């Protein structure tokens, strides 16, 4: 396998990237000058050094010289500690936070549970979620902010059943979100309305 095929194969492992698009990436890189490639390599090498995962919400964030293992949102005591919003991925967290409509805390689930999945615990951070909920006695409401599709609904149902014995209110985002839409592509106003009209 030559270096073009090898790099194409690596790009094809990215979410939503197929073989043809991955090959386009490689040829784009070949058309750039050496400085561009060096800058890209440097950025990739530094990401693991500068970005860490919050031990509470599991999202990735920039250390910015700080040694704390808890992100700025989780240590912000001005937020509503009675609400915990569960989102599938970091990019979904960013979309909700950008909307400015939610002022509680978050948990990044790390994915969703497909309908036919036999081992859901392997697809999402369910053990970490148990620790998060178990440690925080202030939580009254769990907002299941899943994508408006079958896998998202299945994931929400799985979490509800998992914690049905606890004295918690479970809510889901209102249907300002069209069926099939992923959170990361929803505009801030739609997300704001979905949050405000969440169902319990």
Image (cartoon, helix red, strand yellow):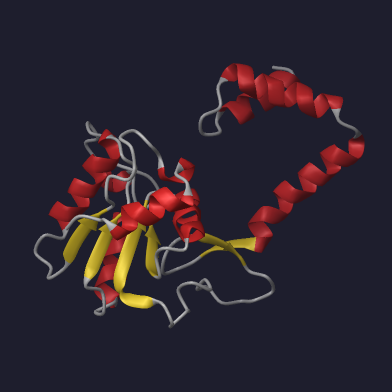
**Residue at position x 30%, y 70% in the image:** 83
Of 97 and 116, nearer the camera is 97
Would residue 191 appear left or right of 139 to someone viewing this image?
A: right
Would residue 193 appear left or right of 2 to someone viewing this image?
A: left
Q: Position of residue 48 (x, y in %)?
A: 64, 56
Of 200 and 85, nearer the camera is 200
Residue 125 visible to the viewer: no
Q: Quadrant of residue 143?
A: bottom left
Q: Quadrant of residue 47?
A: bottom right
Q: Position of residue 164 (x, y in %)?
A: 11, 60
Q: Residue furthest bottom?
A: 77
**Residue at position x 62%, y 24% in the image:** 9
Give above or below for 5 relative to 124. Answer: above
Q: Position of residue 59 (x, y in %)?
A: 48, 60
Q: Residue furthest right?
A: 34
**Residue at position x 27%, y 45% in the image:** 175
Would residue 152 appear left or right of 75 to someone viewing this image?
A: left
Residue 68 visible to the viewer: yes
**Residue at position x 16%, y 60% in the image:** 163
Q: Residue furthest left?
A: 165
Would residue 111 appear left or right of 133 to someone viewing this image?
A: right
Q: Position of residue 106 (x, y in %)?
A: 39, 64
Q: Tell me the quadrant of the picture where the C terminus can be found.
A: bottom left
Q: Tell me the quadrant of the picture where the N terminus can be found.
A: top right
């Amino acid at each position: 396998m030559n270096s073009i095929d090898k790099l194409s194969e690596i790009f094809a492992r990215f979410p939503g990237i197929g073989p043809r698009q991955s090959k386009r990436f490689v040829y784009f890189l070949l058309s750039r000058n050496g400085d561009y490639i060096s800058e890209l390599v440097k950025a990739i090498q530094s990401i693991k050094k500068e970005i860490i995962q919050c031990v509470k919400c599991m999202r990735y964030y920039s250390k910015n010289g700080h040694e704390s293992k808890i992100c700025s949102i989780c240590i912000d005591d001005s937020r509503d500690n009675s609400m915990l919003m569960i989102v599938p991925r970091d990019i979904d967290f960013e979309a909700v936070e950008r909307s400015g409509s939610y002022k509680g805390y978050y948990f990044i689930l790390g994915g969703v549970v497909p309908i036919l999945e036999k081992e859901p615990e392997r697809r999402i951070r369910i053990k970490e979620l148990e620790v998060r909920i178990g440690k925080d006695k202030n939580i009254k409401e769990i907002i299941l902010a899943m994508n408006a599709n079958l896998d998202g609904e299945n994931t929400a149902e799985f979490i509800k059943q998992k914690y049905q014995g606890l004295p918690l209110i479970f809510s889901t985002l209102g249907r300002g979100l069209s069926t099939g839409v992923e959170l990361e592509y929803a505009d801030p106003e739609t997300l704001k309305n979905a949050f405000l009209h969440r169902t319990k």
